[in-house]
Amino acid sequence: MSDLYGLARPFVFRLDPETAHGLSIRALKSGLLPRRNLPVDHRLGTTVAGIRFPNPLGLAAGYDKNAEVPDALLRLGFGFVEVGTLTPKPQAGNDRPRIFRLADQHAIINRLGFNNEGHADAFERLCARARKAGIVGVNIGANKDSADRIGDYVEGVNRFEEVARYLTINISSPNTPGLRKLQEGSELKDLIEAVVAARNGYAALAAMPRRPVFLKVAPDLETYQIEAIAHAATSYGLDGLIVSNTTLSRRGVERTSFGTEKGGLSGRPLFERSTYVLAAFRKAVGKDFPLIGVGGVDSAETVVAKIEAGADLVQMYTGLVYGGPELPLRILHGLVRLLDRTGAASLAEFRDRTVDAVLARGSKVF
């Protein structure tokens, strides 16, 4: 990590995690962070779901919940930024405290519960930056007290399609009761068909290109669930899957002071499980269906490991908390060094190299 963040982190970590997060948003808004000289290397670029990404490293939803600083985050080096999760109506989320750092494990447990300001404010901010360069996706969810959760997702598609480069349907947060049931059976089919129809209908009426729709899934899935989701995703018109959200497992943090807190676990302890599920999805969807790998990413090596396990793109979030704002740039330079060392023409040459090995190793652990 940079010397500056290395010096500052002990003081930052004395603050409540939500207070520290708020200060980081304010710092990005203020422009205090210097502009990075990002590597411009065509070998880092890739096309996924019709979008040309300058590099495969994205920021996952959850950091910029209300679309306040997507352009400042892009300037850190991310090839794309996903804002949200956004629900139709504002909601406060669960009671505090609701974020817990597990510093020795480079992990976080959160039970935020889709706290956000709602569609309207975020839509105005995204309209204001609509003509700017940079890929910004929008992650949409359902209100906790909604009587029609599928309707909430349709509303999100209709609201954000014109200002998002892609849309993510988040049905995998463990912090909204009953939400993960949408990953199963007829409810999943109905959800996908509804959001795809909304996307197609809006694009036709507005005479604009269709925005890709991705589905974000949980890591806590059995083999039969992975196969069912893969079938639904490839059969009913989705453009990709994001694998995965936080986990309810406490593997690797059982003996920590916050290990028994309720919520979703992210960071390094999630890496193996999320990578295993990623590889399982690659097997299930075949070689042509886009996958975005998330979970435990905090280095160039972990980015490559996700790509080798089947990812076309990779996202991170918790790694940024521990690695600081210069981490994306360090990862990009590490990827360029890898390409130089191996002579590879692109990172796509590494995709799927370890799918079978990850599945074989994981089957003995999970």
Image (cartoon, rainbow, N blue to C red):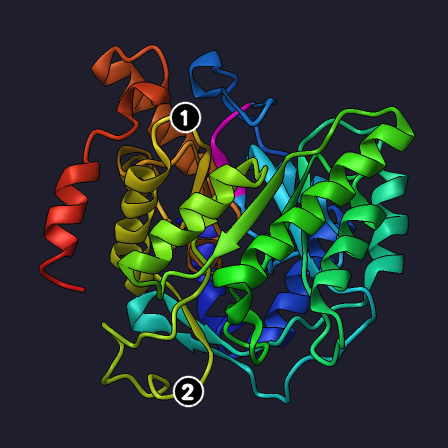
Q: Where is residue 1 in the image (x, y as percent from the top left)?
A: 39, 49
Asked if residue 296 can be seen in this view, the reply is no
Asked if residue 133 can be seen in this view, the reply is yes
Check the image and report above or below for 363 versus 307: below
Residue at the far front in the pictured view: 186
Quick one: label 2, few (<14), some, or many (20+) residues within 10 Å? Answer: some
- From the viewer's perspective, tell me whether residue 345 is left or right of residue 31: left
Q: What residue type is labelled 2?
A: Glu
Quick one: quadrant of the C terminus? bottom left
Is 338 magenta? The answer is no
Main SS, magenta region, reads: loop
Residue ID at (72%, 57%): 153
* Residue named by callout 1: 288
Task: Kindly report the distance in space between the C-alpha atoms of the residues bearing marks 1 and 2.
Answer: 39 Å
- From the viewer's perspective, tell me whether residue 342 is left or right of residue 244: left
Q: Position of residue 32 (x, y in %)?
A: 70, 48
Residue ID at (28%, 47%): 280
- From the viewer's perspective, tell me whether residue 358 is left or right of residue 9: left
Q: Position of residue 121 (x, y in %)?
A: 88, 58
Give the secondary structure at mark 2: loop
Give the secondary structure at mark 1: loop
Check the image and report above or below for 237 versus 170: above
Snapshot quadrant of residue 78: top right
Q: What residue type is labelled 1?
A: Asp
* Residue named by callout 2: 261
Residue toward you, 222 or 141:
222
Q: Give the range drawn in magenta.
A: 54-58
- Residue contact between numbered discs 1 and 2, judged by CB atoms under 8 Å: no
Residue ID at (43%, 55%): 244
Which of the numbered marks, if any, corresponds to residue 260?
A: none
